[in-house]
Amino acid sequence: MFPTDPPTSPGGSLAAALLDWYDAGHRDLPWRQGRDPYRIWVSEIMLQQTTVATVLGYYDRFLARFPDVGELARTDLTEVLRFWSGLGYYQRARNLHRAAIVIAERGAFPETPDAWMELPGVGRSTAGAIFSISRNMWAPLLDANVRRVMERLYGVAPEEKKREARLWEVSDAFGRESPRPGDTNQALMELGATVCLPAAPRCSLCPLAASCQAREGEAMLLFTRPGGQKKKKPAPPRRERVVLLPPDGSLLFVPRGEGRLLEGLYDLYGVASPGILPGTALQEGPYAGCCAGRELFTVTHTYSHFREVVRVVALERAPGEGAGESLPGGGIVLPLSRSLDGPVPLTGVAKKILKKLAQEGWGGAGKEER
């Protein structure tokens, strides 16, 4: 359907045309200031499966707390997760911390893409980005944005045999002769993020449009989601639980166990249940001897493969009953005023609940202020 030879630009190489466009105006992002491999590495890990707009809200704060790889390696993982909290995909933070320890022990950053790929959490595309930008030496990359540019520019159709190898081949060929390898990869990512969009590509603004194999007609339809609509996914499975708030205004946080989703983060203590009727006495756990009061509110949180519904229930002390068992392993008790910016990293659900409690002037907050 498409020619097999790479397209050429009448006014010079495609990379040169792209760099002219990039130099004329691109987003001023904090990780584009210099070639420090540490700052570039952190940004590339944060940007995995996360938008630039979201990362901008965390990057500077993370770098202020962990200004170099030595500081990151020396810090306990719990503190690293606390500054990552809200970015999601927490395995990235765990891998970043593990890799920092390796780099600190070696005393130097990797010097080749293959060496970068030996670190936890660094695949071929991430390694190519870090290496090319920090060293200004060529290595191809194929993140989601660059993949889309390559598919359209070179007409790599969905049904093409050995499609993945073909995409790496054309990505490598695109910038191999460029005098500015790092900027070429930056420009490719910028083009995919701002012009060569998934549903509505802005072809009139593209510096490569004249050479693009998917510029018009049936070809563009092949590489564009119809009407900008994503394929509707089935509703994710639903999980339900109840978070329990004791009558003294304190909040009990417990760590997610090893090997569980969100391992290392802290959640508000509760039980797996679709709900608890008012007046129900608790027979075990740290709140044994209390009975359920009214339901305050419900929050929902969607993960990649399920949707969690959490009901927040206030507890009341049952007359004549005991004070309950000791804290669960690793549990920590905090007042509401110290919870959001407290000493432990919180799950997204816990943050939603705490913000809602603060907004509604939950009784515990009032007790702390008097």
Image (cartoon, rainbow, N blue to C red):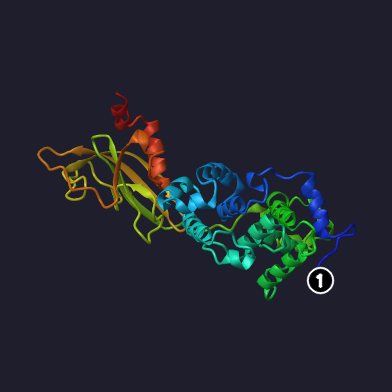
Give the quarter of the image for residue 143.
Answer: bottom right
Q: Is residue 45 above or below residue 246?
A: below
Give the quarter of the image for residue 251.
Answer: top left
**Residue that numbered label 1 is attached to:** 3
Task: Please name the amino acid that badge 1 sits on.
Answer: Pro
Determine whether, in the image, residue 47 is placed left or right of residue 279: right
The answer, for residue 174, to whether it is visible in the render is yes
Q: Is residue 133 above or below residue 287?
A: below
Classify the position of the C terminus by image quarter.
top left
Residue extending farthest bottom: 161
Classify the position of the N terminus by image quarter.
bottom right
Seen at 53% across and 42% down, the residue is: 64
Q: Position of residue 139 (x, y in %)?
A: 70, 64
| Residue neighbourhood size for the residue with mark 1, other residues' Cα within 10 Å, grouped as few (<14), some (14–19), many (≥20) | few
Determine whether, in the image, residue 240 is placed left or right of residue 29: left
The answer, for residue 205, to whether it is visible in the render is no
Residue extending farthest top: 370
Q: Position of residue 304 (x, y in %)?
A: 48, 56
Q: Position of residue 12 (x, y in %)?
A: 88, 59
Question: What SS does tag 1 mark?
Answer: loop
Seen at 36% across and 36% down, the residue is: 338
Q: Position of residue 52 (x, y in %)?
A: 61, 47
Q: Is residue 349 above or below residue 219?
A: above
Residue extending farthest front: 107
Residue extending farthest left: 320
Seen at 65% across and 53% down, the residue is: 228
Q: How many marks?
A: 1
Which residue occupies the foreground of this view, 174 or 242?
174
Which residue occupies the foreground of this view, 24 or 70?
70
